[in-house]
Image (cartoon, coloured by chain):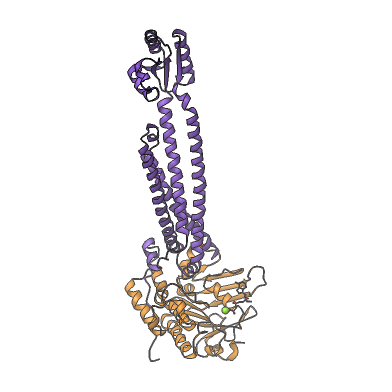
Chain colours: A orange, B purple
Amino acid sequence: MSENLAGHVKFDNVGLRYGTDPEVLSNLSFTLYPGSFYFLTGASGAGKTSLLKMLYLAQAPSRGAIRMFGQDLVTMPHSRLPELRRRLGVVFQDFRLVPYLTAFDNVALPLRLAGTEEKKVQRAVGDMLEWVGLSHRAHAVPPSLSGGEQQRVAIARAVIARPKMLIADEPTGNVDPDMAWKLLRLFEALNNRVGTTVVVATHDVHLLKKVPDSLIMRLHKGQLSDPTGALRYPPNPGGSSVGGSGAE
Amino acid sequence: MSTLPPLPAETDDTPLERPRGRAAARLLPPQRLTGPIPWVIAILIALVVIAAAGGLALRNLSLAASAGLSSAVSVQVIEPNPDLRADRTAAAVKVLTGLPGVTAVQAVPEAELAAMLEPWLGEAATSGDVPIPALIDVELAAGAGPDEVARIAAAVKQQVPGARVDAQGDFLRPVNDALAALQWLALGLVALVALATAAAVWLAARNAFAGARDTVEIMHLLGASQRQITAVFLRDVLREAIVGAVLGAGLGVGAVWLLGQQFAALGSGMVSGGGLMLADWLAIGAVPLAGVLLAGLTARITIALALKDML
Ligand SMILES: Nc1ncnc2c1ncn2[C@@H]1O[C@H](COP(=O)(O)OP(=O)(O)O)[C@@H](O)[C@H]1O
Ligand SMILES: [Mg+2]
């Protein structure tokens, strides 16, 4: 597999409807460029979470084709999906922490699932919790954590296994601006130093300005537009002038 | 940037599917046993064990009874005159000995008969004042049926007046019929309670899944394989089922053993024929095992169906 092919995520005329409702997403066609930093913006209810669900393999499209890491998701057997999922890091909008595992064990879960040596797990999780400012809460269970703390645990869990692609759904919705900035730096570091493709959904315009080289995909009424040339492939680097164009 | 964020650990990109049980045990701590499910399973398993043991004991009892009796005939020679009685008895023995299908003929000694009857007749039994019929035990070849008995009766009666031939099975037939009915009852009970147990086990697995559904979904989204998820979930279900099964088997076997002691204390030859053989105990042991297997199977099916729904 060539690097490009391996890194590709390609949506081709994808549509999504829930049940018999009208489509919430229509005619989505785009290719994510490996190693790029994308923001997905749009008003609440625009369909950001729905799009990300297809991206993190929790939701099949109603129509159209999706390729990921060189594989056709529609035709591939379900038994091979876990392997793809393990290459993704996901910050769910509702966190989805295991309620009876400590913060530490929640963050460690992806590493343990991958069979990482326990000594490495201890060190990596310890470092990560320190960065997100939760060392002192390592042994607390999620129900006893604040919303912002849970969000930081969710982020730590999403990045801990060096995913090929990081997908974050409103990852800074519950933290103050300073922490939001710090968390974004974590995403950037992963993007710059490990080459992780990052997709962050947000309706917060201020966030967009904090990552200079980011590309912006905008969802409006189920359709995508690209004020920065994000949907071109390869994306137009000169076009990534981030302004107030991204949000409602 | 003054302090760089920590770079996450490189994962060993070894394919998963490590030892399932232990790997799973490391992923998530076992859930505490809560709720009535293990108790319900325990009670039902105990009932199955008791009903099965009862049915098996009844079967052994009726087998033992019919094995000893069906192939035997007793001949009575009724004659008040002792000398005549002795002559006729000897004649009957002679006739019987020559008949086909007869394997052994033995006149029961008078003293023995008298001793057997003493509890009923008192001293009259031994005094000779009360005439006692002579008794001849006749053993038939295995497989002898009512036809043989009738043939023998005809032959003896023709040559020995005052002879009466009884198939020993005859007077036991109602008892045997009752035993058979009881066996059917036990079988029906076992079937019903086994069905209820299966339902309880099924519910237990579904219930455990309802409680674990969120966790299962999270693991699924984090890329856990079906095997890993099944291993975690299976462990919790099996723990409930095993606790229930062991408890139930203990209760059931305890009750059966106590009953066995009670019957053994009766010392009756007939009841002792109803003891449980090794094979019976093995069959009873299979009951809790089947319960646990069913729980495991249900859990697997439940998880597979749920994961299929999740994409
Ligand atoms: N599971 C679902 N079933 C039915 N409708 C849904 C479901 N999830 C989202 N929707 C609908 O799809 C639309 C887009 O929702 P969502 O993707 O959550 O948007 P956003 O994340 O941008 O706020 C909304 O109208 C929402 O009501
Ligand atoms: Mg959303």
Residue drawn at 40 percent across, 68 percent down: B27
Left/right placement of residue A95 relative to residue B83 reads: right
Quadrant into which the N terminus of chain B falls: bottom left
Q: How many numbered callouts?
A: 0
Left/right placement of residue B56 relative to residue A118 reads: right
Residue A162 percent across, percent down from the top left: 42, 77
For this rendering, which residue is in front, B241 or A191? B241
Question: In the rendered view, would you say B216 is above or below A173?
Answer: above
Question: In the rendered view, would you say A20 is above or below B3?
Answer: above
For this rendering, which residue is in front, A64 or B18? B18
Residue A34 percent across, percent down from the top left: 48, 78
For this rendering, which residue is in front, B142 or B275? B275
Q: Can residue A14 be seen in this view?
A: yes
Residue drawn at 49 percent across, 74 percent down: A96
Residue B207 percent across, percent down from the top left: 51, 61
In which quadrant of this rendering is ligand 2 seen? bottom right
Q: Is residue B6 visible?
A: no
Q: Residue B66 occupies which quadrant of the picture?
A: top left
Residue B225 percent across, percent down from the top left: 45, 64
